[in-house]
Image (cartoon, rainbow, N blue to C red):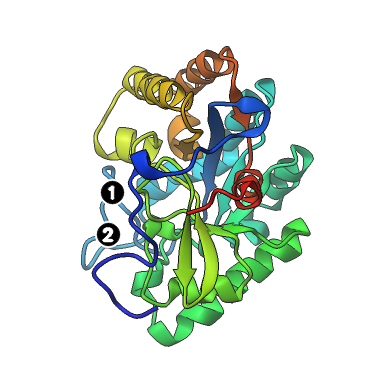
Amino acid sequence: MEPSPYGPFKYVPVNRRPKITWPGGARVALWVAPNIEYFALDEPLPGDAHERPGAGAHTPMVREWGARDYGNRVGVFRIMEVLERYGIRATVSLNSKVCDAFPEIIEDCLKLDWEFMGHCQGNMHRLSEIPPESEREYIHETMARIKAATGKQPAGWLGAGLAETWNTLDYLVEEGCLYVSDWVNDDQPYMMDIDGKPLVYLPYSFETNDSPAIGRKGYTPGEFERMIKDQFDVLYREGAESGRVMAICLHPFIIGQPHRIGALDRALDYICKHSGVWKATGSEIVNHYLKSGVTW
């Protein structure tokens, strides 16, 4: 993709689009995306506010690493328990190194029939920071490892740190991706044109996301719960006219803490008591959108 002042998609304002109708006439497609990630003890890590490591940071950063390892040892299983209770199949944004480091997590995700999308190899390796000549193979290796571990080629991609280069979308199309979720600029899917080849943007959220909300801004679990409910209320009202995507984006080492998991439970209880909520995976949303004939 050549550098340009706007993205590889049309600007189509929300009040000038065809109507999206979700299955069963649902107003909202509920999409829950846990980020299951790998952090190495011998690499510098982000601090408490998730800022990038400073120059000269020393390892091992035991406390910072341990806080993240908690998510893979404990927190992710709390998320599984809550989502299963509400009949929600998640779409995991997966660091491929998790497949080797924590195969038990993959095993349990598969038992729940969760989906997977590529999320780089480790969470400290952002595409914008690796050598440009390595990016194509890096993405290919990420997707190939996830396919080998799960038995299915990932349909989508979310970059670590939501980072891309001018070449990322071309490489994702080469890998057969249906969708990408880095752009956080809409509440409905839309089409991308990658040198004449289609790619769908599936709405991810940097708002109803525990990392920026709790990790960076310091919101309490109750405030995060209120954010999710308020977000849902608006999308649900608007979805009566045209369907919306409600993304809830999670990190096991944050929301999976004992004092925070209840906020997720209560928010999902509130959402799932409404009629017209389609509990969907990423590929289900994208495939329905593509088959609807009302893409833009």
Is 21 displayed left or right of 201 in the figure? right
Q: Is residue 24 above or below residue 62?
A: above
Q: Are marks 2 and 1 in contact (CB under 8 Å)?
A: yes
Q: Is residue 230 above or below residue 67?
A: above
In the image, 87 versus 8, the foreground residue is 8
Residue at 31% from the left image edge and 40% from the top image edge? 212
Judged from this view, the residue extending furthest toward the left is: 55
Is 105 displayed left or right of 111 in the figure? left
Quarter of image, res 220: top left
In the image, 204 versus 18, the foreground residue is 18
| Residue at image mark 1 | 47
Of the residues shown, which amino acid type is indicated by label 2? Pro
- Classify mark 1: helix, strand or loop: loop
Residue 223: where, in percent of width, then height? 31, 20
- Classify mark 2: helix, strand or loop: loop
Of the residues shown, which amino acid type is indicated by label 1? Gly
Question: Label 1: how many residues lie within 10 Å, few (<14), some (14-19) or many (20+)?
Answer: some
Q: Is residue 209 above or below residue 148?
A: above
| Residue at image mark 2 | 53
